[in-house]
Image: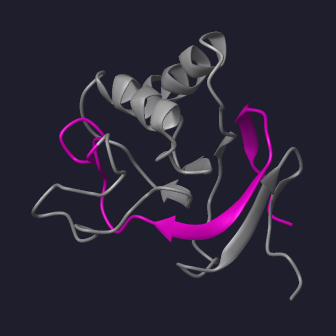
């Protein structure tokens, strides 16, 4: 179990998608599908929908909270966010979703460098774990 700082509580399980470069959700992700659309991004074309999305750093606009809110509303959001640095904008999108009655996702600040991209991980109050197979 790797510990993390819980920013928004919750539980989730899914494949880890560790972004190779910082990304702004606004202009970088299609809010209707969850696909990374930023042409020069190393993960262009991959979907964040249903993934445990690991973002070592974020960039960009305060509108990223609105994109995350739309992703949560339409079911194309990641199942959890793991942030290398606290990002109040992304947390705001999850908090607003909760206030509007949409499903929400856990958000943790942590280091996931030792977990392989694509490996299924479980996120919860205690941190991050790789379920036994």
Residue at 57% across, 72% down:
113
Chief SS of the magenta region: loop
- x and y, in percent, of residue 63 in the image: 28, 23
| Residue furthest left as drawn | 39
111 with respect to 69 (left or right): right
Residue at 87% across, 44% down:
125
Q: Measured along the vertical axis of the image, is residue 84 above or below residue 16?
A: above
- x and y, in percent, of residue 83 in the image: 54, 47
Q: Measured along the vertical axis of the image, is residue 111 above or below residue 27?
A: below
- x and y, in percent, of residue 79 in the image: 62, 50
108 with respect to 16 (left or right): right
Magenta residues span 1-30
Residue at 34% across, 69% down:
20
Q: Quadrant of the C terminus?
A: bottom right
Q: Measured along the vertical axis of the image, is residue 48 above or below residue 5?
A: below
Residue at 18% across, 40% down:
27
Q: Quadrant of the N terminus?
A: bottom right
Q: Is 13 colored magenta in this rendering?
A: yes
| Residue furthest top as drawn | 99
Q: Nearer the viewer, residue 122 or 3?
A: 122
């Amino acid at each position: 179990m790797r510990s993390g700082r819980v920013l928004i509580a919750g539980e989730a399980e899914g494949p880890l998608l560790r972004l190779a470069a910082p990304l702004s959700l606004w202009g970088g992700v299609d809010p209707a599908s969850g696909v990374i659309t930023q042409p020069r991004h190393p993960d262009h074309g991959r979907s964040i929908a249903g993934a445990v999305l690991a973002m070592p750093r974020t960039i960009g606009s305060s509108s990223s909270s609105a994109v995350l809110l739309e992703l949560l509303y339409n079911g194309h959001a990641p199942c959890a966010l793991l942030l290398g640095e606290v990002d109040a904008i992304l947390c705001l999108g999850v908090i607003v979703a909760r206030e509007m009655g949409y499903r929400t996702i856990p958000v943790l600040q942590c280091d996931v460098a030792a977990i392989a991209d694509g490996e299924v991980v479980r996120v919860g109050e205690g941190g991050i774990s790789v379920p036994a197979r």
